[in-house]
Amino acid sequence: MQTRVLKFKLRPLNRNKEVRLRTLKDVFTEAVRFHIGVIASLKTTSSNRIHHACYSEARTRFPLPAATIQQARDKALSAYRSYLDRKKKGRRSSVPVFRHALPLRLAAENLRIFPDRAMVRITTPDGFLWLPLIIPFVFKDAVRLPHAVSEIVQKDRDWYLMLSVKSEDVPALDGPHFGLDLGVANLAVLSGPRIVKFFDGKPLRYVRGRYFLYRQSLQKKRKIGMVKRSKGKESRLATDYNHKVSREIVNIVAGAGGVLHVEKLLGIRDRTKGTRKVNRMLHSWAFSQLLNMICYKAALMGVRVAKEDPRHTSQRCSRCGHTERKNRQKQAQFKCKKCDYECHTDLNAARNLAARRASSLSVGDVTAPQNGERMSNNVTHRDNRNLVSSL
């Protein structure tokens, strides 16, 4: 059983529904703050101890359903565990205080989707709250799947439902294996049988850099409203570009009936260090968004996505298997010290990702056909021009 998150936008709400929804969100945030205070005082991460210590008081203080109180406890526990984990690694950290309102977390029993009516029903202390929902055609079947803990998020004046749905694991496919390496210089590099495709990250870096300088000038003039609006436009441009990249990647793999192997990117910001400019590019890089787009589009098209351990993929030779740090001579240059094989570093990493699981499934080594591969750059030159010219 695997879980994926689908994003739905709510239709404009009337004043009564918006007030009730905002009140629920604020009360939930207060409940999380209450639990984080209890957890910090008891200095424990045991959910049973926290439940026995403050559940009765929380039910009395906060007008929320019982399952929502438990979600507030779990949210506080998750945040406190992250704080302990950062502290254990020697990183500067402090107990979370949640200065801003949090998304409203809803348990599965407090949320129900009605696809035929395009409505979502949530349980509140005052009865059911019905919210109109925009359900794209491609998600008509997905919303009928069993769902898990979901969230309702407010962004500016809009509300979104982040719906977690459960589906059976896709069985292993006896088809070609593709490796996908994500990065900053190259947004993505796809490698498979007789195909290599580079998706250039330069247009996206250019947009990020231009908006960064633009916001700097606005901040000096104290034009905070214009700063917020520029962030929204930059985010929409990046999202549009990620949609095009993810769609083309999934189409290529689905057309070949293959399996896509991607790298697990957990903790990438902690592992990567560089100059201020490099760190800024890394922290503004929407790698999680791109990976989520690839995963849900692949699921809709029946493509299996396997997440692989990325360790040593840039140091291991995809031809002979020799692993050495000196194999990677420069950021984009790979040369094996044992067999003298040379190629682009990101391409070598993508081939290693594809071969890692392919050999274990006894399907064959996808890195073998290296002569006569069809190579391509970017999404299209027209897409790049549109992204840059929109500034």
Image (cartoon, rainbow, N blue to C red):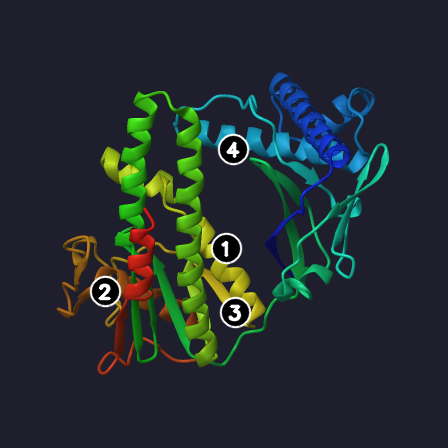
Measure the C-alpha gap from mark 2 to mark 1: 32 Å
Depicted 242 relative to depicted 159: above or below: below
Query: Few, some or many C-alpha atoms within 10 Å of disc 1 (few <14, some 14-19, many ≥20)?
Result: some
Side (left or right) of 59 relative to 91: right
Residues marked 3 and 4 touching at CB (< 8 Å): no
Tell me the residue at 44%/51% (across/down): 239
Residues marked 2 and 4 touching at CB (< 8 Å): no
Q: Which mark is residue 304?
A: 3
Residue with the mark numbered 1: 292
Measure the C-alpha gap from mark 2 to mark 4: 36 Å
Of the two numbered discs 2 and 4 in the rendering, the one whose residue sits closer to the viewer: 4
Give percent across and percent down for residue 376.
Answer: 27, 71
Measure the C-alpha gap from mark 3 to mark 4: 30 Å
**SS category of the residue bearing label 2:** loop
Measure the C-alpha gap from mark 4 to mark 1: 22 Å
Of the image marks 3 and 1, the number of the one nearer the N terminus:
1
Q: Which mark is residue 82?
A: 4
Of the image marks 3 and 4, the number of the one nearer the N terminus:
4
Along the line of sight, which residue is nearer the eye, 91 or 96?
Answer: 96
Which amino acid type is shown beneath numbered disc 3? Arg
Tell me the residue at 24%/37% (across/down): 277
Residues marked 2 and 3 touching at CB (< 8 Å): no
Tell me the residue at 49%/81% (across/down): 174
Residue with the mark numbered 2: 322
Depicted 290 relative to depicted 300: above or below: above
